[in-house]
Image (cartoon, rainbow, N blue to C red):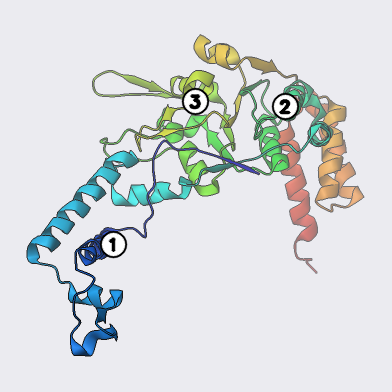
Amino acid sequence: MSTIPFIEARFFNPAEGRIELETRFMRHLRKLRCRRIPPDLPAPPDEIDAPGKISDADLMGIIRFSDDDEARIKRRVKRILECRKAASGLKHLKRDDRERLEVLKDGARLISIRNEHHADELAAALHEDMPWMAPATEVVWHAMRRSVREGWPGLRMPPLLLDGPPGIGKSRYARRLGELLATSTTVIEATGENASFGIVGSQRGWGGSYPGRLIETVLQSRIANPVMIVDEIEKAGRATSTNGHAFGLAEALLPLLEPLTTKRWSCPYYQVKFDMSWVIWVLTSNDHRRLPGPLLSRCPPIPLRPLTLAELAGFVRREGKKRDLSEASIEAICEILAHPSLRQHRSSLRVAARMLQRAADLEQGPTLH
């Protein structure tokens, strides 16, 4: 697993603090003054190491510092620490925030694809689980193979916009992708987010400001290419400030989907630049026509069709076996979903998943006598 520089900041050795620097300067000053002592200086009787000579250790012990010496050392150490703080790029942050970002001082890890055969295996597993998502799987497959073929240090994937009817498992597909890649995954419900603040965070200085889910995901996992899922993005609301400025989720995502700006993305909360060019974005929508043009130009929609009854039954059988359900329960769920009374309703993966969970609860629950 490769590691890349992730944050535009410098982190100095915490073991070189004020006390350590002052001790080092004092030791250095003693050595300089030792060189000025004549080599033939007679030694006191109790400090003789060799006849007529004073040892280096004795010289170091003989030399004393005046108050002016100590004050000058303290001033110099203070200037060094101030210069370090300014050079770090984190001078404007509180101590807790600086310590929070120290986990990135050695960079962030990248999830990678071992070889093209590995890419084929992952794509096959995705397709086997959800074959109706083939258009999205094809994009993912080509991106994985391209990462290997071009020798990238990690998996880089274009942002995906899964557009299709509700209930076909778009967010489930995205979570499964993160599971197969063995990377961290975060799901953001666009309908429940306060405009852009939930993802990118709120700007420092606002009341109740906080970092966004994006940077928090990287800080917790130390992985530079997590899967970030934004569900039902077309339903995201817009917050308006008292001076009339609107803050929309789609607009906040634009710099994170543009290759030219993601490499040096400035976090509103920390006000530090991060390399977000490796993040894997998966957006879902039921109607992409409600999304703004600039977002669609950066993230072209992948049209997806509804499930067929046969595909829904296949999903139930695969998931039922994973949950160790009895054959009778699995077939009963398939019969219910195929009942003529439900034909007027569109096949829904969500309904099937609830039935599977209910069946598992009944089979594994206590037996009543």
Give the residue displayed 24% in from the left and 82% down from the top.
52
Q: What element carries label 1?
A: helix
Circle 2 sits on which residue?
140
Callout in the foreground (1, 2):
1
At label 1, the amino acid type is Arg
At label 2, the amino acid type is Val
Q: Nearer the viewer, residue 19 or 365?
A: 19
Q: How many labels does the image show?
A: 3
Residue farthest to the bottom, as pictured: 46
Q: In this view, does 172 lie above or below 158?
A: below
In the figure, is residue 334 to the left or right of 254? right
Where residue 255 appears, as percent x and y from the top left, is 46, 21
Query: Residue 46 sits in which quadrant?
Result: bottom left
Circle 3 sits on which residue?
262
Q: Which mark is residue 24?
A: 1
Query: Residue 142 sits in which quadrant?
Result: top right
Q: What element carries label 3?
A: helix
Q: Is residue 132 above or below residue 206?
A: above
Q: Distance between the residues labelled 1 and 2?
A: 55 Å
Dot 1, crowdedness within 10 Å: few (<14), some or many (≥20)? few
Q: Residue 95 carries which label?
A: none
At label 3, the amino acid type is Thr
Q: What element carries label 2?
A: helix
Where residue 277 appears, as percent x and y from the top left, is 54, 28
Q: Nearer the viewer, residue 233 or 177?
A: 177
Where residue 79 appears, as percent x and y from the top left, is 20, 48
The mark that comes first in sequence, 1 or 2, is 1
The mark that comes first in sequence, 1 or 3, is 1
Give the position of the N terminus as an image quadrant: top right
In the figure, is residue 104 to the left or right of 180? left
- Residue 209 seen from this side: no
The mark that comes first in sequence, 3 or 2, is 2
